[in-house]
Image: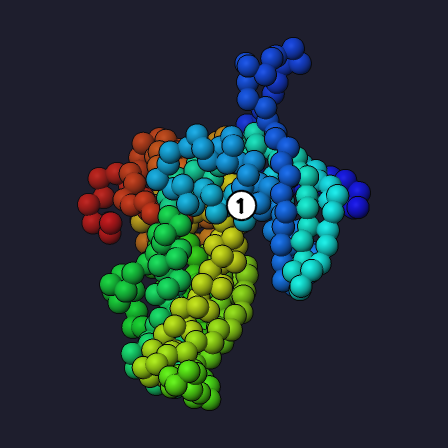
Amino acid sequence: MEKPRKVTGIVCGLAVLSLVAFNAQATAAEAKPPEVVVTVTGESAHSFEEAKEDALRKAVEMGAGTEVFSDTRVADFQLMHDTIVCRAEGYVRSYDIPEKKEADGVYKVKMRAVVAVGRIKDDWGALQILLVRKGRPNILILVSETGTRLSRAGNAAEYKLRELLGERGIDIVDDEALAAVANRDAVHAMIEGDEKKAAAVATQLHAGWLVLGRASVRSGEPKTVYGVDLVPAVVDLFVKVVAADNAQQIASKSASCKANSRDDAASAAKRALEGAAEQVEQEVFKRIVLAWSRDLDVGTKFEVVGTRIPTEVLNVIVERLRMMEGVKMVTIIDTNPQLSTLSVVTRLEPMELGRAIVSASGERVEITGQSPGRIGFKMRGDNTAPR
């Protein structure tokens, strides 16, 4: 039997916005307990370690189900559920494994876990605030596909990723918006070479993150099963998650999927592409949520662009912003007679930051536009400034 474990740290990094305090003399009737004890069994076809991870997820799901999920009626329920469960270890305060066994190739782990329900509630509230603060930033998903007979299977992996992430409540850049700023073939060429150019396209579309992928399809050997001729296709998919503001890669994931079709190679390829997308989607989602979580700790980075702002006004804005509560860093990136660009790291929401800029200027400027990660402003009364 494994010794009881203490789970230290917050694995996925969401800040706890409030601390749950209980009076030592409070009765159970006055407040719900901040934690629950559950017993679950995790399973895996590969290892005891994977079985343990499965048990941790089940423990959190069971614990949250009794105290959180059952009392929650939100439009983002699936986002809430999946976010919490994929971040399981961060909510298990301690556990012990009284039994583990392997039979017929299946590894099983019995676990008794203490689940921090109070933290789950706090962190879910934190995630909602985070999504609002970041303006529910768009994500640009682009997957280039190469291989045999893809005329009717083109972009299947990309569209499947869009569908799956969209179902979790994430806003996705669509083809119409992409076509307005870049040709699809040109963007796919960027995937193979210059990530900075792809990130620049994402910034134009007000997307905070890119999911860039390459899928290759190859034909398998045709076979006959129970008198039915099957056409197989095999897909190898590689995706990476890239931050649009600095083109930094934060995650990557590979998957392979094989599918058969009684029709033709294109049908088999489409199924294999969608299957591979399903395999990588959860890791993509988890990494994006983790990045958002870190933003909650350190603040969101905004590009603040002023049009024809006098130097003395800009200096006053910078000085006063640096003194404001909730503003962590203000850096002058570029200044010239036409455009001045600041980088501002802050916990303020976009509208709050906009009001702060106006206030810092002594009401001499006005906001011309707000979007996730970007705020524009100009001198009040300057009707020639672009909006």
Q: Is residue 355 visible?
A: yes
In the shown orientation, is residue 46 left or right of residue 288?
right
* Above or below: residue 261 compared with residue 210: below
* Above or below: residue 97 compared with residue 106: above
How is the rendered protein coloured?
Answer: rainbow
Expressed as whole percent of the image width and height from the top left, the position of residue 316 reads: 43, 37
Foreground of the two, 82 or 297:
82
Expressed as whole percent of the image width and height from the top left, the position of residue 303 reads: 41, 49
Q: Helix, strand or loop at disc 1?
A: helix
Q: Residue furthest front?
A: 226
- Going by the numbered disc 1, the residue's amino acid type is Val
Expressed as whole percent of the image width and height from the top left, the position of residue 136 reads: 38, 46
Foreground of the two, 181 or 211:
211
In the shown orientation, is residue 111 left or right of residue 217?
right
Q: Residue furthest top?
A: 25
At label 1, counting other C-alpha atoms closer than 10 Å, the crowd grade (few under 14, some 14-19, many 20 or more) is many
In the shown orientation, is residue 42 left or right of residue 371?
right
Q: Is residue 293 visible?
A: no
Foreground of the two, 366 or 190:
190
Expressed as whole percent of the image width and height from the top left, the position of residue 150 reads: 34, 81
Q: Residue at x 24, y 63 (%)?
A: 176
- What is the quadrant of residue 161 in the picture? bottom left
Q: Residue at x 52, y 70 (%)?
A: 255
Q: Residue at x 35, y 40 (%)?
A: 75
Q: Which residue is mark 1?
A: 85
In the shown orientation, is residue 340 left or right of residue 296?
left
* Above or below: residue 31 compared with residue 255: above
